[in-house]
Amino acid sequence: MGLGDKMQKAFCSMCPNGSCGARLCWHIMHLILSMWFYILGLVFMFESFLISNGLLKRYRTLNISKVQYLAIVIDSEEALQTLKVLNLLRWLAAIGLKSVCLYDKEGVLKRSKQAITERLKSEKRFKEISTSDPLHDEKGMILEFISSSDGKEAVARAANFLLEKRYSSEIKEKPNFTESDMADALRAIGYQSSDPDLMLVYGPSRCHLGFPAWRIRYTEIMHMGSLKYMKFGFLVKAIYNFTMVHQNYGT
Amino acid sequence: MENKIESYGSSLVSHMRRLLFRVLSVGPIPNHIAFILDGNRRYAKKRNLGEGMGHRVGFLTLTSLMKYCYELGVKYVTVYAFSIDNFKRRPEEVQDLMDLMLEKIEGLLKEESIVNQFGVRVYFIGNLRLLNAPVREAAEKVMKATANNNKSILLICVAYTSTDEITHAAQEAIEEKRGEIPESSEASMAQNGEISQEKHEGHRTIKLADIERHIYMGVAPDPDILVRTSGETRLSNFLLWQSSTCLLYSPKALWPEIGLRHLVWAVLNFQRVHPYLEKRRKQV
């Protein structure tokens, strides 16, 4: 057996299923991908700097009236960074947003609600949304805090509401519940009906993490990266990009 | 001679693609990929094609993507072929789309179709009562003909929206529970005109599992990647219930322009975030 054959045999013995070449190529592909995202991250940081300092003309004025309702989805582990969440809300208020819905899957933001709202109420720019029809303060931002229990579980509760309605009806035939009935049932049991126009996702991946399905039919979903590295300029860019979108709603 | 070169070239491309898939398979491969086929009309306008031609080219793209997915080892492929919202389009356009759908659905039954090539079981998902009779019957025929296939699954969402799916599932759950209530109890409740707390507690309430049992897409696991082409970042009422821990990918290319490189990019991105998404998926 020649030296080359012995070396090949030794090499193959390290990878019993003979996939070393494939494994190496896979790692190289992912290394290139990671480098690409790193470079992209640097470009975004620079762009964010330029936007924050008003050096890019098109981002200087935003048509903020197009964003009637903004959803912020944060990964539950990242949502523990309450100071970052507070900063984000201050930025949103500074931009001029009127209604913001904060969501994380596990309910971390709900548990931090009191700490967040007390801190912000002292700045007199915020008003927490209640289950009853909120009074709209022209000067303040309205905040809503939700979690996954306001999603699928809410639909099950709405179904129970409709079931009770079905019991109390004397009609024997099978009623045909419509989407409108479902929406009314959700509202009747206290779930907010406004659909966000735009959703900004803070976390490792572009994923809505179980935000109430009923409310995101036509919501634009943008990934903002990790909350830890959030940038004001990037936030402005995301909102600007949204204001440029045209929807035809399937027609 | 030219045919030989073309055949050799095609074989080489196929071989290279298999090698690429072998490399990708070192990491986790998505079990289910869903596609929103957006951009057919814009493609036709961009290329100065006749009306409806964008959708025809889009269908060729669909068969290519399906082939790549099944070769890669993706078991479930879902496509958003026609939304309930699309019925709001001009009647002539809707009719053209229905005619195209009928033609392509019937084509699925042919011997040389991708369905037979890959042993694909086909499901048509949505409120099929909204479709005209020929399309509905063709869809039912294909579902029956492919019922024994089990290598791969193709879910074609037609006359579908998530909110309609959720409403339908809730309705079915309500009727199921309604059927469990004895008639005597119901009669007394109707007389009283109200539900007393004690009587309500005596009856089973609808749980989340009851709703999920009646969801149209219950025949497949939740998608791992949801691709919407044309750079649009919304889901347009598609798989909203199922996409909680699904990577959303929005390439700028129009649907007929989508190719292998976009699929590879989507899978690489999926592999990057797979540990995170798996962790979130396991958290109930």
Image (tube, coloured by chain):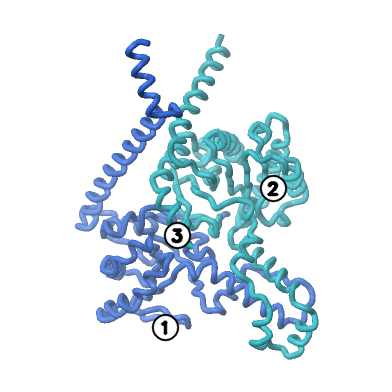
Chain colours: A blue, B cyan
Determine contact: label 1, label 2, CB under 8 Å. no
Say which quarter of the image contains residue B23: top left
Q: Are marks 3 and 1 on the same chain?
A: yes
Please state the horizontal and vertical placement of residue A54, each as a whole percent of the image.
21, 57
Label 1 crowd (10 A; few <14 / some 14-19 / many >=20): few
**Distance from the alpha carbon under mark 3 to that under mark 1:** 30 Å
On screen, residue A116 above or below B115: below
Q: Which mark is residue A209?
A: 3
Please state the horizontal and vertical placement of residue A7, each as a whole percent of the image.
34, 18
Single out the residue that lies furthest toward the top: B1
Say which quarter of the image contains residue B105: top right
The residue carrying mark 2 is B95
Q: Is residue A100 left or right of residue A180?
A: left
Please state the horizontal and vertical placement of residue A172, each as a whole percent of the image.
79, 76
The chain containing the residue under callout 1 comes to: A
The residue carrying mark 1 is A135
